[in-house]
Amino acid sequence: MLILKFWEGLSISLTSTLLGLLLAYLHVFWWEAPLIKPFMVGWSIIYPSFKLLPVIEIGSVALILVLAVIPYIAATIIPSWKAAVTDPSEVMHA
């Protein structure tokens, strides 16, 4: 049962992380960052030319995946494991 919880956590965290990376890429490079561009170029009426070039580093993507996937899997597996090894009578009396 714990292996199913592991695969569930892995699939949810990988899907959400990759979807977030895709949406961030689309927001910045496809739609030209409408939510954060005013903060980067300033609040003046005449904006300077500001073109973002897409650069994707495998190391950065791997770091984002590690920082998003590992804690989520730990947060799902550890409570499930503790519930599996704890005696039910101890839990009921506590």
Image (tube, grey):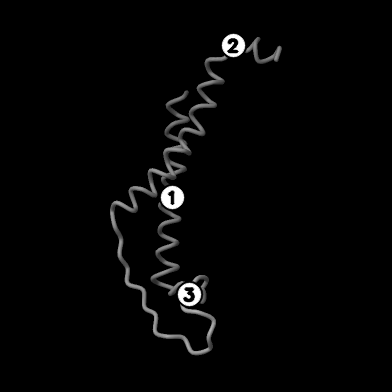
- Precedes in sequence: disc 1 or disc 3: 1
Mark 1 surroundings: few (<14), some (14-19) or many (≥20) residues within 10 A? some
Task: Name the outermost residue toward the right.
Answer: 93
Q: Amino acid at mark 2?
A: Asp
Looking at the image, which is closer to me, 78 or 18? 78
Task: Name the outermost residue toward the left.
Answer: 58
Q: Amino acid at mark 3?
A: Lys
> What mark, if any, has residue 17 been given in the picture?
1
- Precedes in sequence: disc 1 or disc 2: 1
Question: Which residue occupies 46% across, 86% down?
Answer: 47
Question: Which residue occupies 29% across, 51% down?
Answer: 59
Mark 3 surroundings: few (<14), some (14-19) or many (≥20) residues within 10 A? few
Figure check: 46 above or below 24: below
Q: Amino acid at mark 1?
A: Thr
Looking at the image, which is closer to me, 33 or 47? 47
Give the mark toward the camera: 1 or 3.
3
Percent position of residue 16, x then y: 46, 49
Callout 2: SS: loop
Disc 2 target residue: 87
Q: Quadrant of residue 87?
A: top right
Mark 2 surroundings: few (<14), some (14-19) or many (≥20) residues within 10 A? few
> What mark, if any, has residue 51 been given in the picture?
none
Percent position of residue 58, x then y: 28, 53
* Mark 1 vs 2: CB contact within 8 A: no
Callout 3: SS: helix
Figure check: 31 above or below 11: below
Disc 3 target residue: 37
Q: Quadrant of residue 56?
A: bottom left
Question: Which residue occupies 51% across, 76% down?
Answer: 38
